[in-house]
Image (cartoon, rainbow, N blue to C red):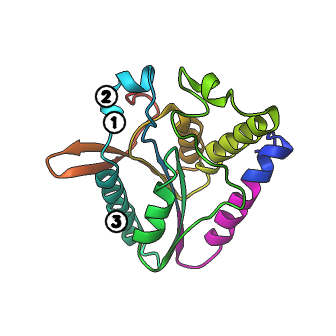
């Protein structure tokens, strides 16, 4: 984090401070989740159909796994940090998590594009093309901040894999905290803990 630019830190620090404050509370856990839905993208994302998800089912399964984790830690309260390419995901958590959980609200947040993503897709340059340089700098700063913030929790959930989460996985595992991935079966989304950094489907 020391290497982040002042602009990236202006997004990261408020998130980090809220997570750090929650960790100091007795009986509290912090949980990070990254939900990658895709946003009418083409190229790599469009071709890898195993990444395409039913968002409602995915979120229900993610919440159930998080609830199991909270019970395993015998926690009385929780703070959840959500990063997603879908602007509806954070409000879903706000409306559907238990009453003794709080969903972190970043002090600074930028809108998502109507179609596509700002980075990582073959059309990303085109999507960003309508923005001036100041806004492009802000978007990059927010993205970098989210990457690092996802590695700050007591556990990390990645229900639908994205390379966006590589740094967060490494940061979480370096602290010897669990990372949970999902698989889909007859009973819906089932989560399993990642045991090594060697193999995962991209």
Quarter placement of the N terminus: top right
Q: Which mark is residue 49?
A: 2
Magenta region, residue range = 12-30
Mark sitting earlier along the chain (2/3): 2
Residue at 45 percent of width and 41 percent of height: 36
Q: Which residue is mark 3?
A: 68
Q: From mark 2 to mark 3, how far is it between C-alphas?
A: 29 Å
- Crowd tier of the residue under label 1, counting other residues whose Cα lies within 10 Å: few below 14, some 14–19, many 20 or above: some
Going by the image, does 145 lie left or right of 68? Answer: right
Residue 50 image point, x, y percent:
30, 31
Indicate whether 172 appears above or below 108: above
- Crowd tier of the residue under label 2, counting other residues whose Cα lies within 10 Å: few below 14, some 14–19, many 20 or above: few
- Crowd tier of the residue under label 3, counting other residues whose Cα lies within 10 Å: few below 14, some 14–19, many 20 or above: few
- Of all residues, the one furthest to the left in this rendering is 186
In the rendered structure, are the residues bearing label 2 and label 1 in contact, judged by CB atoms less than 8 Å apart? yes
Q: Main secondary structure of the magenta part?
A: helix
Mark sitting earlier along the chain (1/3): 1
What number of labels is visible?
Answer: 3
Residue 73 image point, x, y percent:
43, 69
Near-viewer residue (62 or 91) = 91
Q: Quadrant of residue 184?
A: top left
Q: Which residue is mark 1?
A: 52
Inspect the magenta stretch and tell me whether residue 41 lies in it: no
Q: From mark 2 to mark 1, how far is it between C-alphas?
A: 5 Å
Residue 136 image point, x, y percent:
74, 35
Q: From mark 1 to mark 3, how far is it between C-alphas?
A: 25 Å
């Amino acid at each position: 984090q020391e290497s982040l630019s002042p602009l990236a830190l202006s997004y990261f620090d408020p998130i980090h401070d809220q997570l750090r404050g929650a960790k100091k509370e007795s009986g509290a856990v912090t949980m990070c989740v990254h939900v990658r839905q895709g946003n009418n993208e083409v190229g790599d994302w469009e071709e890898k159909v195993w990444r395409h998800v039913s968002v409602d089912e995915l979120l229900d399964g993610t919440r159930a796994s998080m609830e199991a984790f909270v019970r395993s830690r015998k926690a009385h309260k929780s703070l959840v940090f959500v990063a997603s390419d879908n602007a509806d995901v954070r409000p879903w958590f706000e409306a559907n998590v238990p009453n003794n959980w709080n969903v972190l609200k970043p002090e600074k947040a930028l809108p998502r594009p109507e179609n596509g993503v700002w980075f990582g897709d073959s059309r990303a340059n085109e999507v960003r093309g309508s923005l001036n340089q100041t806004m492009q700098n802000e978007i990059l700063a927010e993205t970098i901040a989210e990457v690092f913030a996802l590695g700050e929790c007591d556990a990390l959930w990645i229900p639908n894999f994205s390379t966006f989460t590589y740094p967060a996985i490494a940061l979480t595992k370096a602290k010897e905290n669990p990372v949970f991935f999902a698989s889909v079966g007859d009973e819906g989304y089932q989560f399993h803990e990642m045991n090594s950094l060697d193999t995962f489907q991209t």
